[in-house]
Image: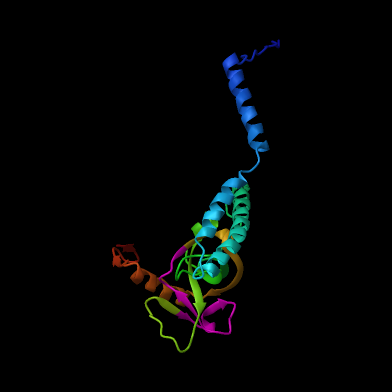
Amino acid sequence: MTENVTVHSQKPSSSDQNTLLDQELNQDQDQNTPLPISQLKIKFNDFLSKINKDNFHKALEIVEWISIQLDLHDKAMQYRHQKHNDKNKCHPIRPVRGEIYMAELGSNVGSEFNSWHPVLIIQNDRGNTYSEKTIVLPMTGYKQNKRYDKNIYHKIYPDDFDEGQPNKISLVKIADITTIDKARLGRKVGKLNDHVMKMITDKLRKHLAIRTCQNKPGQTALR
């Protein structure tokens, strides 16, 4: 025999109803409220007041970078959404350690790298699979008549590539370890061979004052 069971839902109290109504009204107000452009104008006027003949070109670069940065932010949010919807929570952009990509490094300060540069992926591949960011070393062109500190730079020859083969010598800057969002990554340029990556890793250890000590056969620990 089947019993018909009636479930009575509890009616919200008047205070609860008022709270829900307030939340709905606030949401509607947020959607319909115009953007506070006046705040941007105030900030931008302050920015303009600091421009002089010495920093004009940098100011122009910064203004151009704002638009690019907004586009990169939108791309990063799209990647985050795709990662969230992936059943394994993998990021849609999965570079591999040792690969070289073009990357938009933006408008930065002083001697920091700016704009588009090739970068070497040095983050481990688990991080590259799941993280929204990756760790890179920026690269630059080699000038024959210039002297370079071998502890800070590592020279890359065309024969050092497993994939891709540029027709000129370049430099990896060991001292400029940088964490970037994967939205900054552009096209893949190539991949360095394992021997070269080992030499770069050894230079990274020295630069960061990380030394290895032997625990047991086949095991090392970092100090």
Residue drawn at x 50%, y 74% as measured from the top left: 139
Region of the chain picked out in magenta, as a range: 155-178
Q: Nearer the viewer, residue 25 or 47?
A: 47
- Position of residue 65 relative to residue 199, above or below, is above
Looking at the rendering, in which quadrant would you find the C terminus?
bottom left
Residue 155 drawn at (x, y percent): 46, 81
Residue drawn at x 68%, y 36% as measured from the top left: 32
- Position of residue 146 relative to residue 201, above or below, is below
Residue drawn at x 54%, y 68% as measured from the top left: 56
Residue 41 drawn at (x, y percent): 59, 51
Residue 206: image quadrant is bottom left
The stretch drawn in magenta includes residue 182: no
Q: Nearer the viewer, residue 124 or 155?
A: 155
Note whether residue 106 is visible.
Answer: no
Residue 17 drawn at (x, y percent): 61, 19
Considering every residue shown, the one lying at the far bottom of the view is 145
> How many numbered marks appear?
0
Looking at the rendering, in which quadrant would you find the N terminus?
top right
> In this image, 55 relative to 18: left or right?
left
> In this image, 64 relative to 111: left or right?
right
